[in-house]
Amino acid sequence: MRFMMLMIPLGYETAPPDIQLDPERVRAMMKYNEALKDAGVLITLDGLHPPSTGARVSFAGGKPLVTDGPFTEAKEVLGGYWMIDVKSREEAIAWAKKCPASENEIIEIRRVQEMTDFSPEVQEAAAGFAEIQKSRP
């Protein structure tokens, strides 16, 4: 089962574009990332720049509207993610609990949808999805 572990650093919604990372925290996180890799469960991972450098596209009224960050209404934003492949939700939770997160960070765990999770009608409607996934750079 694939799970996405989403890092939610509280306060990151107001972080400046040029935020500097603490090298000691980065070293601790790299040790954790290596443990995921060495266990053979890590698929991919990335950190994300602060929302102040991003944009949101909303579709109220059926027309795209672009809003540049930061987003004043945001209470929680993503700071990064890990995609892991484990046997169960409990195993994903066990890995999240090992993360050297600080007290102002939360990890949300979400199972990735698989085609087999859906009805035959939905699988038919999504025909070609696997080929689109494989075309990623």
Image: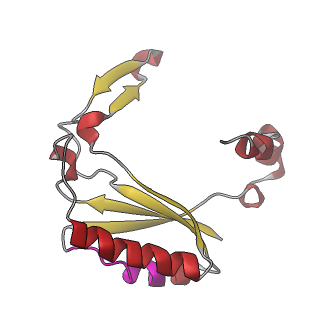
Residue pictured at 21% horizontal, 35% vertical = 70
Along the line of sight, the residue nearer the viewer: 61 or 100: 100
| Residue 87 vertical placement versus 108 (above, below) | below
- Please identify the quadrant where the N terminus is shown: bottom right
Which quarter of the figure has residue 115? Answer: bottom right
Along the line of sight, the residue nearer the viewer: 26 or 124: 26
Position of residue 104 measured from the top left corner of the image (x, y, whole percent) = 19, 68
What stretch of residues is rendered in magenta? 93-102
| Residue 1 vertical placement versus 98 (above, below) | above
Which quarter of the figure has residue 40? Answer: bottom right
Report the colour scheme: secondary structure
The answer to whether residue 5 is left or right of residue 113 is left
| Residue 41 vertical placement versus 83 (above, below) | below
Asked if residue 43 lies in the magenta stretch, the reply is no
Position of residue 63 measured from the top left corner of the image (x, y, whole percent) = 44, 15
Along the line of sight, the residue nearer the viewer: 91 or 15: 15
